[in-house]
Image (spheres, grey):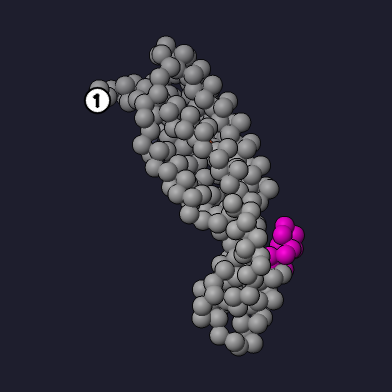
Amino acid sequence: MAAKSLRDLFIEELRDAYDGEQRLLKALPRMAKAATNEELQDAFTRHAKETERQVARLEKVFRSIGEGVRGKKCDGIIGIVEEAKTAIDEIDEGAVLDAALIAGGQRAEHYEIAAYGTLAHFAELLGEQRAKDFLGETLEEEKAADEKLSMIAMSDVNRQALATNGEQSDEGGGSSLQAGMRRVAQAMGMTDDRRGQGGRRSVGRRGNSSTKRSGGGSSRARRSSRAAKKR
Ligand code: FE
Ligand code: ZN
Ligand code: FE
């Protein structure tokens, strides 16, 4: 049924959001499980709990406008969740996967921010004040979830991923002093797991500016232990 009025469209979009939230409710625990960084695991787990409350809040929105609670297949979230699944299937556990999970998680949050921003304004225009308040509340939660993921990415995960990238590649390392220094830098970045942001920051920059894909190719042991962990 094509929407013929803003109110029709409002209801259609609410159904879309309701379906999307339920899909995210299933996906978030899987993303938490696939994450290595503890802060990231925690962020996904907390947001899953929050998402449960958002589902309940949407049910209140439906009731507040006198509509039955119904979902309508949300193709956008289906696509975003599908991409996250692909990352989990294809990338080894560790910082690179964590970075991919954040990239996917933020896509979901941005999608939701767009949806709830629109819905809240529709509600306002339609004179549905209670609905507007509920939707605005969820909007703020989605923004906070997005910011939390940005923070984890930029303070920690992305630079760890940068160090992992150099470490995992075997080809083209050369045998220069530079390559040796890179190995040391990578070892530091990898062993000192969640501390020393400042130290790792300069390490990351150096690795990035000189060579992206080359590395010493020394950490076979670490790689195989990671592989074992995955199995
Ligand atoms: Fe949500
Ligand atoms: Zn959708
Ligand atoms: Fe969300």
Count residues near mark 1 (Cα–Cα under 10 Å), then give few for <14, some for 14-19, many for 20+. few
Q: Main secondary structure of the magenta part?
A: helix
In which quadrant of the rendered view does residue 119 lie? Answer: top left
Closest to the observer, 76 or 93: 93
Q: Position of residue 207 (x, y in %)?
A: 59, 74
Residue furthest top in the image:
66
Q: Look at 75% across and 60% down and name the residue there.
A: 195
Q: Amino acid at mark 1?
A: Ala
Q: In the rendered image, which residue does mark 1 sit on? A: 2
Q: Position of residue 108 (x, y in %)?
A: 47, 42
196 is within the stretch colored magenta: yes
Q: Look at 49% across and 23% down and name the residue there.
A: 58
Answer yes or no: is residue 81 visible. Answer: yes
Q: Which residues are magenta?
A: 189-203
Q: Look at 63% across and 36% down and name the residue there.
A: 46
Residue furthest bottom in the image:
176
Closest to the observer, 128 or 84: 84
Q: Position of residue 192 (x, y in %)?
A: 74, 63
